[in-house]
Image: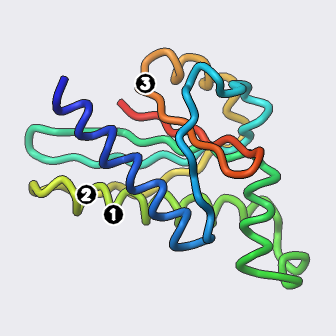
């Protein structure tokens, strides 16, 4: 159980740090029971695997689409309209999770490898099954809830 708690802390601190450094967003922990869970709120999901000789953890990041749009606008500004929206969102979510995964890997202090982030759209078919089998962390910034799952 101590290992799960340690992993939870590492993942949580990595998520909060990435949002603060990249977007100046302060994420406040939100009790999972208070999270508005709906696959409609999270049309995209990024996942990455971090594994070592005797260790493996899959981390999933779900961010509401309107927050993803705001984050993309922060990076691209008016140029956002010149790009394929879905591609920009997928790239951004993958890069964000890559930063988080690299931070988690470094914090583990054991030899580990970081997989390539995968971003999926239309995750409603797998959403509830993933919730059931994963540990959950949730955060809020403004009125936007960010969901982190891991197993």
Residue underneath mark 1: 102
Q: Real-space Cα distance between discs 3 and 2?
A: 19 Å
- Cβ atoms at labels 2 and 1 below 8 Å apart: yes
**Left or right placement of residue 89 versus residue 127 in this view:** right
Of 1 and 94, the residue lying toward us: 1
| Label 3 Cα neighbours within 10 Å, binned few <14 / some 14-19 / many ≥20 | some
Q: Residue at x 53, y 66 (%)?
A: 95
**Left or right placement of residue 115 versus residue 33 in this view:** left
Q: Is residue 72 above or below residue 105?
A: below
Residue underneath mark 2: 105
Tell me the colour scheme of the image. rainbow
Residue 5 is tagged as: none
Q: Residue at x 22, y 63 (%)?
A: 106
Q: Earlier in the sequence, mark 1 or mark 3?
A: 1
Q: Residue at x 32, y 43 (%)?
A: 9
| Label 2 Cα neighbours within 10 Å, binned few <14 / some 14-19 / many ≥20 | many
Residue underneath mark 3: 134
**Left or right placement of residue 138 versus residue 106 in this view:** right
Q: Residue at x 26, y 32 (%)?
A: 5
Residue 38 picture location, percent across and down: 73, 25
Q: Quadrant of the C terminus?
A: top left
Q: Earlier in the sequence, mark 3 or mark 2?
A: 2
Q: Quadrant of residue 89?
A: bottom right
- Label 1 residue SS: helix
Q: Quadrant of residue 88?
A: bottom right
Q: Real-space Cα distance between discs 2 and 1?
A: 5 Å
Residue 61 picture location, percent across and down: 54, 45
- Label 3 residue SS: loop
Q: Quadrant of the N terminus?
A: top left
- Cβ atoms at labels 3 and 2 below 8 Å apart: no
- Cβ atoms at labels 1 and 3 below 8 Å apart: no
């Amino acid at each position: 159980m101590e290992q799960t708690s340690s992993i939870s802390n590492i993942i949580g601190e990595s998520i909060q740090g990435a949002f603060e450094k990249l977007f100046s967003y302060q994420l406040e922990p939100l009790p999972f029971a208070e999270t508005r869970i709906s696959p409609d709120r999270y049309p995209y999901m990024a996942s990455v695997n971090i594994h070592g000789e005797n260790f493996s953890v899959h981390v999933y990041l779900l961010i509401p689409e309107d927050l993803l749009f705001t984050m993309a606008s922060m990076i691209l500004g008016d140029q956002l309209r010149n790009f394929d929206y879905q591609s920009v969102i997928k790239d951004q979510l993958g890069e964000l999770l890559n930063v988080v995964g690299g931070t988690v890997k470094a914090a583990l202090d054991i030899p580990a490898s970081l997989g390539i982030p995968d971003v999926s759209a239309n995750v409603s078919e797998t959403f509830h099954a993933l919730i059931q089998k994963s540990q959950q962390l949730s955060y809020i910034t403004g009125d936007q809830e960010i969901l982190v799952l891991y197993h």
